[in-house]
Amino acid sequence: MTAFVFTAVITLAAGYLLGRLRPWQRAGDWAADQVHFTGTWVRGGSGRQAVVVLVHVVTAPRTSLRIMRAPNTETRAPAPVRDPDWIAHRSRGGHK
């Protein structure tokens, strides 16, 4: 009977601590930050990238699938257009 009470108390205490510390949510938040805000983790090597992606997939599977299905949106600066008749189109009063 004493072993059962001891096991129950330890189990309740461990559950309470896990509920307070929320390691699952913290790991998910960390992985989401690493994935969304690409910074040093990109330069961390393929091992670190694999760990980050694995933690993100395990802690937030729906978000991970949505990120993987999203098309790659590459933002580029518009290339300057060369105007062969730039002299005819320039303004006469200097800067506008």
Image (cartoon, rainbow, N blue to C red):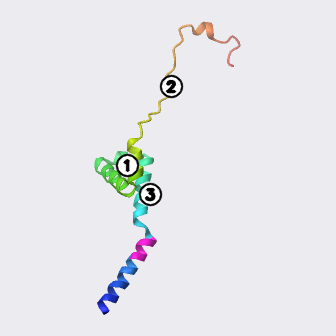
> Nearer the viewer's eye, disc 1 or disc 2?
2
Q: Which numbered dot is residue 33?
A: none
Q: Which of the two residues, 4 or 95, is positioned nearer the viewer here?
A: 4
Answer left or right for 84 relative to 28.
right
Gap in angstroms between the C-alphas marked 2 and 3: 35 Å
- The answer to if 14 sits in the magenta stretch is no
Q: Position of residue 75 (x, y in %)?
A: 47, 33
Answer left or right for 37 relative to 89.
left
Report the residue at 31% width, 47% height from top.
45
Residue 70 position by quadrant = top left
Q: Which numbered dot is residue 41?
A: 1
Instruction: Give, as a single range, the part of the protein colored magenta.
Output: 15-20
Image quarter where the N terminus lies is bottom left
Gap in angstroms between the C-alphas marked 1 and 2: 29 Å
| Number of marks drawn | 3
Q: Residues within 10 Å of mark 1 (few under 14, many from 20)?
A: some
Q: Position of residue 46 (x, y in %)?
A: 29, 47
Amino acid under label 3?
Answer: Asp
Amino acid under label 1?
Answer: Trp
- Judging by the rendered image, the residue that carries numbered circle 3 is 29
Amino acid under label 2?
Answer: Pro
Residue 76 in the image: above or below residue 9: above
- Judging by the rendered image, the residue that carries numbered circle 2 is 78
